Image (cartoon, helix red, strand yellow):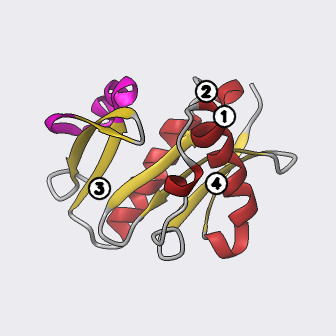
Amino acid sequence: MNRFTLIETGMTHHGAALAAVRRAVFIEEQGVPEALEWDEFDAVSTHWLAMLGDGTPVGCARLLPDGHIGRMAVLPAWRGQGIGRALLDAALAGARARGLTCVRLSAQTHAADFYRRAGFVAQGDPYEEAGIPHLAMLKRLDAEPI
């Protein structure tokens, strides 16, 4: 297995690498319209980027100031190797460091079990977002030992 590194960053410093992963996963693989992929939250969010030793970007995630985790993506060839969980753990640690007591996300339904294993609980019924079934999920951070 190739080793990867996670860095906490922003669109200003690593925008091209973050965009490359998101374009490959959301726009090309999943068919999300490009106009829906990029939003005003990119500039104000904290982002994490997973890179191989040679600097190749393979995954990303973002944390909005209000505690929403999103834009979690790992390139297909690198799935199942712990990158997604490392990105999620980094976003959760980032939320705790910012004093947040709760995080939310909009999980694609096929990934809901991944988030359940990390302690997220489904909220409500599935809904469609960008033509893909999603489920609102929540995780309380104030009830956990740090």
Is residue 81 left or right of 101 when viewed as pictured?
A: right
From the top left corner, tell me how far across and down residue 29 is, in percent.
Answer: 62, 31
Q: CA distance from mark 3 to mark 2?
A: 27 Å
Residue 59 image label? none
From the top left corner, tell me how far across and down residue 54 is, in percent.
Answer: 87, 47
Tell me, yes or no, whether the two marked residues, 2 and 1, touch with CB atoms within 8 Å.
yes
The range drawn in magenta is: 108-126
Is residue 72 left or right of 127 when viewed as pictured?
A: right
Residue at disc 1, secondary structure: loop
The amino acid at mark 4 is Leu
Tell me which label, 3 or 4, sits earlier in the chain: 4
The C terminus sits in image quarter:
bottom left
Q: Is residue 51 above or below residue 101?
A: above
For label 4, the residue is 49
Tell me which label, 1 or 4, sits earlier in the chain: 4
Tell me which label, 3 or 1, sits earlier in the chain: 1
Q: Is residue 54 above or below residue 40?
A: above
For label 1, the residue is 75
Circle 3 or circle 1, nearest the eye = 1
Q: CA distance from mark 4 to mark 2?
A: 14 Å
